[in-house]
Structures are given as C-alpha cells and as structure tokens.
Image: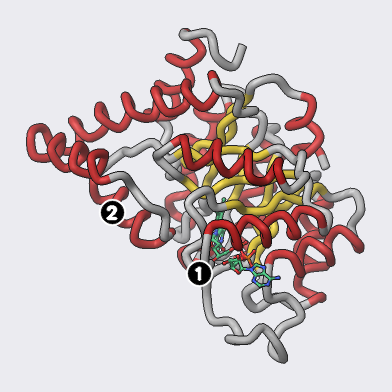
Amino acid sequence: MQVAQNINEAGQFFSFEFFPPKDKSTWPVFMERAARLAALKPLFASVTYGAGGTSHDNSLEICSLLKKDMGIDILAHLTCVGASEQSIDEFVSRLCETGVSDILALGGDGVKDANGEGQSRFFHASDLVEYVDDKFSEVGIAVAGYPGGHPESPSIAKDIEIHNSKLSKGADFTMTQLFFDNRLYFDYVDRLAELGSTAPVIPGVLPIQSLSSLRRIMSLCGAGIPGDLYCGVEKAFEKGGDEAVMEFGFDFARKQISDLLDRGAPGVHIYSLNRAAMCERLITDLKGDGYFN
Ligand code: FAD
C-alpha cells in the first residue's frame, strides 16, 4: 500500500494517469514520454485497465516497466467487467510480484448483467474493494468518485451516499473523475465529510490539449463541461488551431490546479493522455509559482 501511504504522508503532490498503448510498436515512444514525466518526480502514476480495449496483459506489463525501469510507484486500475475470483487473484498477485501494491477498484464500462445478479461475483466496484481488502490485506485500494455525479446515478446525493459506503468497505482514498468547475470538487469533499468520511479525495484534472481529444473524452466519460469553457476552446481553435487550443488549455489547467491547491486539495492527479509537453510545462510553471515544493 505504497501509494495510499504516501498520499497520507506527502505534502502537496502531483501524479499522472497513463493508458497502455494498444499497438506495441508505439511503446518506445510511450516509454520515452513516460520517462520525461517520471523525471518530474510524480508521487505515483496510475495505469488504466481494459479502457479503450487495451489488454490486461498490456496493463500489467506497463505497470511493471514503469515501476522497475523508472522507479515510479504505481496505482493499477482494475475493473469488475468479466472478472472472476481467479482472474482477480492472478492479476493482483502478479502486480505484487512486480512491487506494485495499490489498485484503483472500478466497476468498469461494458456488458454487465442488468440487475447485478447471476453473471458475475463482481458487479460494482464495492465488490472488488471487499474482496481485495479481505484477500490481499497488504494492497492499498482507491475508488473512483464523481464530483458531477456518476452518469447512471439517479442524483448526486444518492451517488455520494453509495460512494461513502464504497469507502467504508475498505477503500483508502478516492480518485475523482475529471471536472472543470472546482466548486463541484469542494462540494463533493464537504458532502463526504458530512457523512463522516476522512479518506483523501484526489482531484482528477484534464489539461485540454486539443479540441478533438476533448470531444472524444467528454463523449466517453460522461462528465460535464461548462458552456463558456467549451465555447472558449472552440473559439481558440477557430483562431489558431490546435496550437491556440494548447495555450488556452494550459492557462485554464494552471489556474484550475492552483485554485484546487490554494483551497486545500491534497494534490492533483493529471490525465496526461500519454503526452509529455503540456504536463512538463504545467508542473515546471506551478513549481515556479511555489507549488509542490
Ligand atoms: P461503481 O462503483 O460500480 O458505480 C457505478 C454506478 O453504480 C454508479 O452510478 C454508482 O452510484 C452505482 N453503484 C455503485 N455501487 C452500488 C451499489 N452497491 N448498489 C447500487 N448502486 C451502486 N474504466 C475502465 O474500464 N478502465 C479504467 O482503467 C478506468 N479508469 C477510471 C479511472 C477513474 C478515475 C474514473 C473516474 C473512471 C475510470 N473508468 C475506467 C470508468 C469507470 O469504470 C466507469 O465510470 C464506470 O461506469 C463506473 O465505475 P465505478 O468504479 O464508479 O463503478
């Protein structure tokens, strides 16, 4: 439970999310970018699982390469979709063998039994939390939180109530879905605290790097974007193409992250999209502004 422990003990921190590229011929480029981000000394990196059709073996291999070759602590994503006790045991044991001892337990998107009965022992993230907590006591467990509400939830209040019960089943901290309005994050943290939760809530931040990637991600993840922000991105694109969007996205992310940290967020988890330049510039400038020191 290296990551869970470090989050509690570290000062203000940053971390990155990576996704394992499907095409292995692109791995050298991926590793070169990951090495540039590792040089910034993130507290940890998270590696997605099954998302976008990547294989579970690729997830394991990337976790192992980042841990062993670059010395980064890893939070390995793990989903319920298609999982059995045997597949979970195998995945977590292999992670532990490579020195990775933290998972992000997720429901996952995909074909699931509509009423949660019959097909799988693991339906909701909470099923994974309970199982892994019981069977692998040395493993730290994070869960996903949705400051704007999970798209399938009847209400934000209900979602938070369910999230709190997920935490009480053995999760150590929350990693949030991306959001652009910091009020959503602070309201979410307050509402969890009102329910008695003291587990850290790490805000997930997506620096906007292009109009096309923004559109793709927003259509996949179900999070919202304020209208004026989206119009700002479109306007930037009309004026100066992707380069102007990068500048716009950089300015927004820098302000969003500094506001989160100024108002007490423990750190930020940055959705890198496996690209290095924007993250390098953000971290360097924020360090220059006195953050993460
Ligand atoms: P759950 O906790 O199961 O919640 C799903 C829905 O069910 C919510 O509406 C919740 O309120 C409700 N619910 C939960 N428990 C119960 C219960 N006991 N009874 C009734 N209702 C319940 N997907 C991937 O495939 N791979 C990844 O690597 C990945 N990484 C992600 C990382 C982050 C930080 C986030 C925020 C999401 C990620 N996802 C990933 C997407 C995620 O799998 C989906 O958002 C999925 O729809 C929900 O996952 P969850 O863990 O919140 O599921």
Residue 266 higher or lower than 69, as above or below: above
Q: CA distance from mark 1 to mark 2?
A: 20 Å
Q: Name the disc covering residue 215, or none.
A: 2
Quadrant in which residue 265 is drawn? top right
Q: Secondary structure at mark 2?
A: helix
**In this rendering, position of residue 56 left or right of residue 230:** right
Q: How is the image coloured?
A: secondary structure
Q: Quadrant of the C terminus?
A: top right
Q: Say how many tags the image has.
A: 2
**In this rendering, position of residue 247 left or right of residue 168:** left
Q: Quadrant of the N terminus?
A: top right
**Ligand 1 contact, mark 1 (Cβ < 8 Å):** yes
Looking at the rendered structure, the kind of residue marked 2 is Arg
Quadrant field for ligand 1: bottom right
Q: Name the disc covering residue 107, or none.
A: none
Q: Give the residue pinned by disc 1.
A: 152
x, y percent for residue 282: 42, 23
Looking at the rendered structure, the kind of residue marked 1 is Glu
Q: Secondary structure at mark 1?
A: loop
Within 10 angstroms of label 1, few (less than 14), some, or many (20 or more) residues? few
**In this rendering, position of residue 135 left or right of residue 147:** right
x, y percent for residue 231: 18, 42
Q: Residue at x 46, y 35 (%)?
A: 182
